[in-house]
Image (cartoon, grey):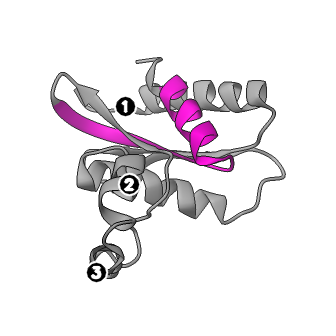
Amino acid sequence: MNVTLKAAQKIVDAAIQKAESLGIRVAVAVVDAGGHVILKARMDGLWFLTTDICEGKAYTAVALQRPTEQFVANVATPRPQFYTGLAALSDGKIIAAGGGIPIKQGDEIVGAVGISGGTPEQDIECATAGIATL
């Protein structure tokens, strides 16, 4: 399975709906298995850099094949030099912040969603709501 534009739209819509229910504004990016953007959206009035941040979170989740909060806890925080090296090798695309979650079909990672705008916990909640639509 590939993440289609139609599936990405469902993810974005559900993530934004969840953000609205939490009383926050977010930016959402959905990427394919190669980290290429399928769809990206930003709620009205949100800081423009959040679109780059959510894309980085989605890219990080698919590139490292794990939720970004695991990367933060297990790699970036205990070994900041390793994180700095990864960020440099990826031209700054690797982001150490919660809110990026891989999209799986069975055991295969077929893409990822990244959310930016809330706390890490809120971003994760919105990403999880989006993925649940698949």
Q: Earlier in the sequence, mark 2 or mark 3?
A: 2
Above or below residue 48? Residue 81 is below
- Residue 73: give its label: 2
User: Of discs 2 and 1, which sits in the foreground?
Assistant: 2
Tag 2 near tag 3, CB within 8 Å: no
Q: Is residue 60 magenta?
A: no
Q: Residue at x 45, y 60 (%)?
A: 56
Percent position (x, y) of residue 91?
A: 36, 79
Q: Decide: few, some or many residues near mark 2? Use Cα within 10 Å; few <14, some 14-19, many ≥20.
A: some
In the rendered structure, which segment of residues is drawn in magenta? 108-130
Residue bearing mark 1? 4
Tell me the kind of residue under disc 2. Ala
Percent position (x, y) of residue 33?
A: 25, 45
Q: Secondary structure at mark 1?
A: loop
Residue bearing mark 3? 85
Q: Earlier in the sequence, mark 1 or mark 3?
A: 1
**Which image quadrant for residue 95?**
bottom left
Q: Residue at x 60, y 24 (%)?
A: 14
